[in-house]
Image: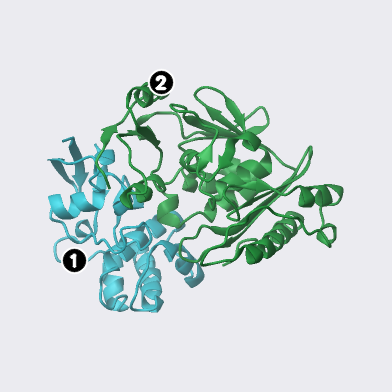
Chain colours: A cyan, B green
Amino acid sequence: MPLVTMTVNGTVVSAEVEARTLLAEFLRNHLEMTGTHVGCDTTQCGCCTVHLDGVGVKSCTVLAVACQGAEVLTIEGLATGDALHPMQAAFREHHGLQCGFCTPGMIMSALDMVRRKGHDLDERLVRRELEGNICRCTGYHNIVKAIQAGASAMKGA
Amino acid sequence: MYDFHYLRPATIDEASRLLATEPDAKPMSGGMSLLPAMKQRLSRWSAIVDLGGVAGLDEIRMEHGALVIGARARHVSVLSSSVVRAAIPALAELAEGIGDPLVRNRGAIGGSVANADPAADYPAALLGLGATVVTNRREIAADDFFTGLFETALEAGEIITAVRFPVPKRAAYAKYRHPASRYAVVGAFVAETAEGVRVAVTGAASHVFRVPAFETALSKSLSLDALAGVTPAYGDLNADLFASSEYRAHVIGEMVRRAVQACLHPSTPSRNA
């Protein structure tokens, strides 16, 4: 089986995997980092969003072997000890979740949104940019508010 | 997904050689169409030749007055490229409507073109603008490239390296998209070129096609009035859960109308929200 080595949340990890192993499966099954969720497995829902070399991607549609030498950031890599990342804190503050299943993907997608669109995000833009992330509980209202607040809070961070 | 050999060549020549030696190998670009099809076991390959390690395939540049986009240029690179925005803004807007932001971060033009999904957006731009597909072996006019449902003129071992777009006087793409898949239920690309107006439609049949009746009318006058009374006869249009063939025929006319409107008034939003 191919050997793949990548850096996940700052730690170099290495494993022999089948070529067909998806990045999401590698994170969850091989590294036992289950913060990255798989909601649909069809590139629709965005629950599996992680950052690959700094860019948001759906990890259910990326081969682990294609990430040789790459830097991966997952939801587990955001907080500093007990201190939540400002975007995580904003989701808690604004109750940007109900069941919480989509939340890791929402937060990783929100951070990609900030990278691409900056810190001042209007509601319309956030809703459009969230097209790749599906929540089945909240109707998005608080998620949108959380992302706007989190983006703004990151400005000072 | 069935397992496969994963190969990551560093050059196009090496990739071509691998495709020739493996019994049933498939090149992969961004993988946004290929991997979902493999996951559903709709397709199976003995080897995946990942073009991600080939340098220099993602350039976007002007060359002899034409816009050249490397096959590995990601959708996000096309939509945010100042070169594309200056030369063919309609192409940047089209790229901005593909999939969702996370898909656009990863998917690339070469893969989309090679895959020739009947509802994909880029094929409409290639055919509408009269683009040329550049491969490791030859150049293929868009008019000769899309040959059927997920079928192209590409031969075994042939790899798209770039797409060359002539710069039109005006162009626009209007898309009625499926709200969940974000593919085109119907998309129409209208371009005013040196040789007249071209109209290409995606999403409506087995593959992208031109509509001569609209082209003739719009070549006389690129205006909404020119469309009055033009009722093209279509061959077999797609019919599915989302749209009957009769409905698609109607939506083609509406998308062409919106694209013409956007050509005349570039600030008009041509995408449905």
Q: Nearer the viewer, residue B80 or B91?
A: B91
Name the spot of residue B189 as percent of width and height, x first: 66, 51
Identify the disc placed on residue A93.
Answer: none
Q: Are marks 1 and 2 in contact (CB under 8 Å)?
A: no
Q: Which chain is indicated by disc 1?
A: A
Q: Pointer 1: residues within 10 angstroms few (<14), some, or many (20+)?
A: few
CA gap, disc 1 and disc 2: 50 Å
Please state if A48 lies on the left or on the right of B255 as rendered. Answer: left
Q: The disc labelled 2 sits on which kind of residue? A: Asp
Look at 70% across and 61% down and name the residue there: B258
> The residue tagged with tag 2: helix, strand or loop?
helix
Instruction: Tell me which amino acid carries mark 1.
Output: Ala
Q: Is residue A39 above or below residue B66?
A: below
Q: Is residue A103 visible?
A: yes
Residue for point 26% across, 61% down = A38
The residue that disc 2 covers is B13
Examine the image and state in which quarter residue B198 appears: top right
> Looking at the rendering, which quadrant does residue A49 occupy?
bottom left
Image quarter in which the C terminus of chain B is found: bottom right
Circle 1 residue:
A83
Callout 1 secondary element: loop
Q: Position of residue A77 (x, y in %)?
A: 21, 56
Query: Which residue of the protein is positioned furthest toward the right in this rendering?
Result: B220
> In the image, is B113 to the left or to the right of A50?
right
B119 above or below B153? Answer: below
Decide if residue B87 is in sight here: no
Discs 1/2, front? 2
